[in-house]
Amino acid sequence: MRFAGVAYQQFLLAVTINDNDLSHTYQLADQYVNTLFAELMTAVQTTEESSSVLKNSIELQKKIREFSKGFECFCLDTFQHFKQHQAALIVDDPAAAFDQWTRVFDTQYLKYMQQDQVCRDYANILSSTARLFAVFAQHR
């Protein structure tokens, strides 16, 4: 029940947030992450041979970040579409709007996760993770 309350609060915040502020926040976060990755890659390239594990780890983190970013975009796009088409319901009956939102999101989420590219990207992340763990296990 507590999680439903938190989800509902987040829904109400998302409905009222300024789209430009949200977009700006995501851009700043992306710039920060990209700067960190660039600094890590520079550090990795200046170290010795053992850097291959670190380099693979950074590449995996990039893949995970891109996958997460794609999912965030899906969520935002889905919500923006919902917000545009259900504006009256959101104002008149936020509880019913939240109920409708969960149904819409569930349907769209299943469609999103069944896309070939999403499945391939996720499988690639799992494969890269398994290879990295195998390398870690060899070095123990």
Image (cartoon, rainbow, N blue to C red):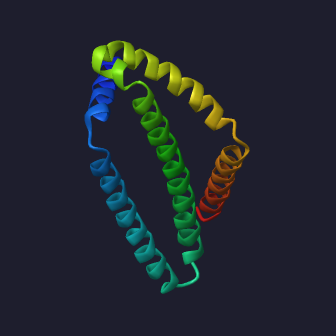
Which residue does the image show at 58% across and 82% down from the upper left? 49
Image x and y of residue 15, in percent: 31, 31
Q: Is residue 36 above or below residue 124?
A: below
Q: Is residue 129 left or right of residue 77?
A: right
From the image, which quarter does the C terminus lie in? bottom right
Which residue does the image show at 48% across and 86% down from the upper left? 46
From the image, which quarter does the N terminus lie in? top left
Residue situated in front as seen by the camera: 107 or 83: 83
Q: Is residue 41 left or right of residue 17?
A: right
Q: Is residue 89 left or right of residue 66?
A: left
Q: Is residue 1 visible?
A: no
Which residue does the image show at 29% across and 15% down from the upper left? 92
Q: Is residue 111 above or below residue 69?
A: above
Q: Is residue 96 above or below residue 50?
A: above
Residue situated in front as seen by the camera: 140 or 74: 74
Instruction: Give the total of numbered labels.
Output: 0
Image x and y of residue 102, in percent: 46, 21
Image x and y of residue 93, in percent: 31, 13
